[in-house]
Image (tube, rainbow, N blue to C red):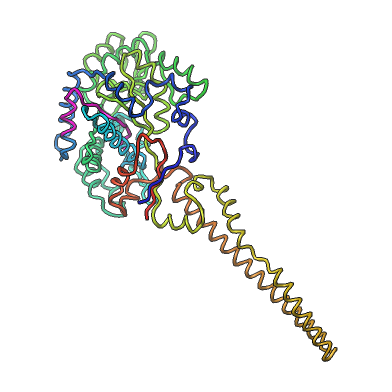
């Protein structure tokens, strides 16, 4: 495997905010606490004075969540270590996409693994655990119910409502029957698990368990107790709205805020239900239901049953940091952007703000596509350009083969002039015959030139088609490969795919990775 890197700016696929962040632009510095470089973690470790009681709760809850799961030794060791005072987490989060969804989910986890490894080497007195925060409370089923494998979209239809992590896996057999071949890990996960959350834990454990990745499901009473006081303040003071609105006013002078903040950033969570909570006068209503609470009632509920309250995108990061001894959050460009809206919120609640890291991104080029790339004469960096620009470049390359037989025509005319001179000397009546043959020869040359030109045009059409097909392979639907293609698109033919990512990704380099089969 040939591994190389290019600047994110050369890809044209990342926002100005992300690029400014990576170059430490002064305009963004008020919106984060520490830039994520290895040296900064000495301060982050000192700042993260995580309660011993919460460590015990976390470790016990994780042991409960992993009951019935065949855990590799690395996962068992990491869960046990979380109860210890010098253990910290490196966290990434993602939805419960079927079959892991787009590749960038895999890239997130590999980035978390390698970040933990790099920090372990730099700070041997501490222990660092890569964590996958499962978005089990998300209710946007349309975002997780499909994936694309070998260019074909597969989807699961279900009428279930509420938090997707609680969805029953019943009905997934039909989707499994549509698959082009057998995938034992996924088949076992979806047929033997009761819920989508259990299935996803099984899958991640099978793919990343040997690397020590720990899955955390926040949809549980034990962990939600740490969120109770936050929920109560949000209900009465609308803390999220005031803090984030203030931050947005400063941020939007240079950048567009990524997410919208609401007056109350909480959902009401129950069986088959996750709906927004809104305040109407002195009462609190759960949208699209008949549920209505007085302030006293809803605050008592938040105290007694905090699991009934689900944070939205604004409060979810705060909840995560309340239950994990976390030092860094790893996300894509959009996640990095909305974390910058939250620093003021963290300050209001007195919760340490973690380092916000951009996950690794990559372009994977198979051996066949690498050969096509070389044959067309393009560099990897050039392929990030739009297709019309690539076609212009190809036209420049192909012009080297332009057919022009003018030189041959001139030479042919000279030959027949000599023949005319000879004929005139021998028998002047033959000059006319020589002229006729000269015209025939010129006509034949002209026809040959047309045939050669047509052949070049056909060859150009073939090259244009090859270019368009290659562009689609490397950038399906015109976007980065990682946003469309599924893990199995590559792992099926390359069982060592994940390990190659682990070997290649450098989380603190902040450059785009290109992996090319040889």
Between 433 and 227, the one nearer to me in the picture = 433
Between 444 and 492, the one nearer to me in the picture = 444
Looking at the rendering, which quadrant does residue 328 occupy?
Answer: top left
Residue 74 image position (x, y, % from top left):
18, 37
Residue 154 image position (x, y, % from top left):
35, 47
Quadrant position of the C terminus in the picture: bottom left
Total numbered badges shown on the rendered structure = 0
Q: Is residue 81 above or below residue 478?
A: above
**Visible residue check, residue 113:** yes
Extent of the magenta region: 77-96
Looking at the rendering, which quadrant does residue 88 occupy?
Answer: top left
Residue 396 image position (x, y, % from top left):
60, 54
Q: What residue lies at 39% left-to-right and 56% top-to-bottom?
A: 367
- Residue 94 inside the magenta-drawn segment: yes
Between 465 and 229, the one nearer to me in the picture = 465
Which residue lies most toward the right here? 428
Residue 230 image position (x, y, % from top left):
30, 15
Q: Is residue 169 above or below residue 133?
A: below
- Residue 226 inside the magenta-drawn segment: no
**Visible residue check, residue 157:** no
Q: What residue lies at 57% left-to-right and 47% top-to-bottom?
A: 389
Q: What residue lies at 28% left-to-right and 50% top-to-bottom?
A: 496
With 13 as the anchor, is 265 left or right in this view?
left
Between 206 and 136, the one nearer to me in the picture = 206
Looking at the rendering, which quadrant does residue 439 occupy?
Answer: bottom right
């Amino acid at each position: 495997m040939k591994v190389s890197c290019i600047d994110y700016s050369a890809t044209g696929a990342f926002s100005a905010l992300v690029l400014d962040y990576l170059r430490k632009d002064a305009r963004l510095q008020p919106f984060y606490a520490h830039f994520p470089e290895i040296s900064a973690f000495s301060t982050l470790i000192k700042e993260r004075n995580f309660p011993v009681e919460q460590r015990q709760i976390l470790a016990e809850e994780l042991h409960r969540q992993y009951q019935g799961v065949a855990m590799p030794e690395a996962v068992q060791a990491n869960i046990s270590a979380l109860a210890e005072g010098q253990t910290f987490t490196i966290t990434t989060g993602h939805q419960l996409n079927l079959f892991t969804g787009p590749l960038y989910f895999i890239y997130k986890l590999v980035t978390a693994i390698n970040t933990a490894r790099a920090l372990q080497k730099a700070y041997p007195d501490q222990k660092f655990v890569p964590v996958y925060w499962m978005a089990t409370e998300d209710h946007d089923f349309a975002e997780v119910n499909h994936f694309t494998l070998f260019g074909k979209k597969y989807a699961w239809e279900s009428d279930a409502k509420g938090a997707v992590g609680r969805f029953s896996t019943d009905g997934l057999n039909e989707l499994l029957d549509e698959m082009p071949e057998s995938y034992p890990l996924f088949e076992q996960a979806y047929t033997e698990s009761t819920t989508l959350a259990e299935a996803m834990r099984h899958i991640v454990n099978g793919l990343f368990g040997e690397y020590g990745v720990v899955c955390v499901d926040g949809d549980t009473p034990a962990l939600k107790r740490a969120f109770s006081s936050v929920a109560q303040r949000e209900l009465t003071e609308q803390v999220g709205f005031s803090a984030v609105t203030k931050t947005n006013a400063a941020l939007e002078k240079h950048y567009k805020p990524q997410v919208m903040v609401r007056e109350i950033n909480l959902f009401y969570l129950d069986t088959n239900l996750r709906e927004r909570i809104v305040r109407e006068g002195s009462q609190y209503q759960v949208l699209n239901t008949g549920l209505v609470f007085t302030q006293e009632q809803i605050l008592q509920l938040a105290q007694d049953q905090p699991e009934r309250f689900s944070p939205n995108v604004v409060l979810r990061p705060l909840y995560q940091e309340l239950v994990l001894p976390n030092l860094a959050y790893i996300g894509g460009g959009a996640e990095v952007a909305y974390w910058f809206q939250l620093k003021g919120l963290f300050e209001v609640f007195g919760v340490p703000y973690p380092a916000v890291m951009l996950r690794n991104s990559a372009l994977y080029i198979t051996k066949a596509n690498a050969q096509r790339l070389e044959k067309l004469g393009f560099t990897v960096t050039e392929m990030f350009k739009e297709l019309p620009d690539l076609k212009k470049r190809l036209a420049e390359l192909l012009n080297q083969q332009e057919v022009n037989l003018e030189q041959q025509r001139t030479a042919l005319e000279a030959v027949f002039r000599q023949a005319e001179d000879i004929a005139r000397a021998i028998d002047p009546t033959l000059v006319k015959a020589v002229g006729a043959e000269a015209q025939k020869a010129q006509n034949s040359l002209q026809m040959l030139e047309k045939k050669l030109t047509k052949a070049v045009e056909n060859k150009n059409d073939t090259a244009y088609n090859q270019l368009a097909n290659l562009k689609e392979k490397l950038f399906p639907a015109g976007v980065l490969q990682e946003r469309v293609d599924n893990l199995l698109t590559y792992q099926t033919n390359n069982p060592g795919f994940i390990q190659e990512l682990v070997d290649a990704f450098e989380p603190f380099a902040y450059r785009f990775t290109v992996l090319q089969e040889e």
